[in-house]
Image (cartoon, grey):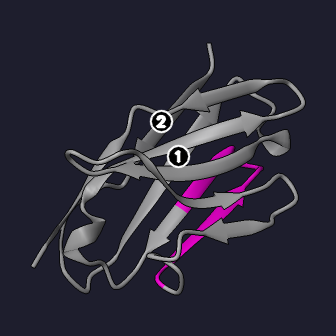
Amino acid sequence: QVQLVESGGGLVQAGGSLRLSCAASRIAFNIYNLAWYRQAPGKQRELVASITASQYTNYADSVKGRFTISRDNAKNTVYLQMNILKPEDTAVYYCSANSVRLGQTYWGQGTQVTVSS
């Protein structure tokens, strides 16, 4: 069974940093497009950052210049480095793996990020 397991969330003060990790198992990791989404209470889930199998990255305007997505195919892991965190970054963060070719999308269980002012 495919698993995506996030880690690295927690409580941090505004201006601080966190690094989220998402480890995948039982998928051909290197062919999947990967992404981080977040969902704040009472809001819809939104795309934060994505990285394609060919390493092309894309970011939401709200996190450009502060967050960096990266992947390590040898470790089957995708990362989200979050700097200069703001209270509005508070949310549950989810990683996803998508293969258009295979028609498959997988989600992790989420990790809570709370930024205090």
* Residue 19 x %, y %: 42, 66
Q: Which residue is farthest left?
A: 117
Q: Which residue is mark 2?
A: 5
Q: Which residue is farthest top?
A: 1
Q: Are marks 1 and 2 in contact (CB under 8 Å)?
A: yes
Quarter holding the N terminus? Answer: top right
Viewer-proximal residue, 62 or 35? 62
- Indicate the secondary structure of the residue bearing disc 2: strand
Query: Alpha-carbon distance for marks 1 and 2?
Result: 5 Å
Q: Residue at x 62, y 20 (%)?
A: 2
- Indicate the secondary structure of the residue bearing disc 1: strand
Q: Residue at x 28, y 48 (%)?
A: 43
* Residue 66 x %, y %: 46, 83
The reply, left or right, for residue 64 in relation to residue 100 is left
Vertical side of 35 occupied by 4: above or below: above
Quarter holding the C terminus? Answer: bottom left
Ranked by sequence position, the earlier of labels 1 and 2 is 2
Q: Amino acid at mark 2?
A: Val
Viewer-proximal residue, 3 or 89? 89
Q: Amino acid at mark 1?
A: Cys
The reply, left or right, for residue 35 in relation to residue 43 is right
Q: Residue at x 61, y 51 (%)?
A: 35
Crowding at mark 2 (Cα within 10 Å: few <14, some 14-19, many 20+): some
Residue 72 in magenta? Answer: yes
Checking the image for residue 22, the label placed there is 1
Q: Residue at x 53, y 32 (%)?
A: 107
The region drawn magenta spans 66-79
Report the magenta stretch's main SS: strand
Vertical side of 42 occupied by 66: above or below: below
* Residue 82 x %, y %: 42, 73
